Amino acid sequence: MLHEKLVQVIAEKFVSSHDQHGFDLRFALTMRDDRRPKEWSVVFDVFTPSGDLLDGPVVVIVSDETNEARFL
């Protein structure tokens, strides 16, 4: 079973491995997913290249069983 800090690290590595096209994804929070008990939701705020916060975050799902991450 993963702990919260490790889940954050996995999600941050996953996000950084993808081209963000100049946008900046900043970690916001990590939480357990009530509908998916074996997965974590990791929320990232999205900022434009000029520094403006976009409406609506990006969510990365991290599996407790496989340690794999994916975009929601």
Image: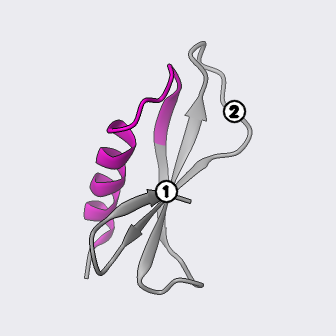
Look at 52% across and 83% down and name the residue there: 36
Look at 41% across and 84% down and name the residue there: 38
Give the total of numbered labels: 2
The amino acid pointed to by label 1 is: Leu
Question: Considering the image in quadrants, where does the N terminus appear?
Answer: bottom left
Mark 1 residue crowding within 10 angstroms, few (<14) / some (14–19) / many (20+): few
Q: Quadrant of residue 7?
A: bottom left
What residue occupies the far top of the structure in this picture? 50
Q: Nearer the viewer, residue 63 or 45?
A: 63
Whether 29 is drawn above or below 47: the answer is: below
Q: Which residue is mark 1?
A: 29
Look at 66% across and 22% down and name the residue there: 52
Is disc 1 placed on a helix, strand or loop? strand
In the displayed structure image, the side of residue 17 where residue 34 appears, left or right: right
Q: Nearer the viewer, residue 31 or 71?
A: 71
In the displayed structure image, the side of residue 56 where residue 6 appears, left or right: left
Q: Earlier in the sequence, mark 2 or mark 1?
A: 1
Q: Which residue is mark 2?
A: 54
The magenta stretch spans residue 18:
yes
Q: Where is residue 31? Give x, y as percent.
A: 49, 69
Is disc 2 placed on a helix, strand or loop? loop
Question: Considering the image in quadrants, where does the C terminus appear?
Answer: bottom right
In the image, the segment drawn in magenta is: 3-26
Look at discs 2 and 1 and give the one toward the viewer. 2
Q: Which dot marks residue 13?
A: none
Q: Where is residue 26? Give x, y as percent.
A: 47, 38
Query: What is the C-alpha distance between the residues marked 2 and 1?
Result: 16 Å
Q: Where is residue 41? Give x, y as percent.
A: 49, 66
Whether 5 is drawn above or below 57: the answer is: below
Mark 2 residue crowding within 10 angstroms, few (<14) / some (14–19) / many (20+): few
The amino acid pointed to by label 2 is: Leu
- Contact between labelled residues 1 and 2, with CB atoms less than 8 Å apart: no
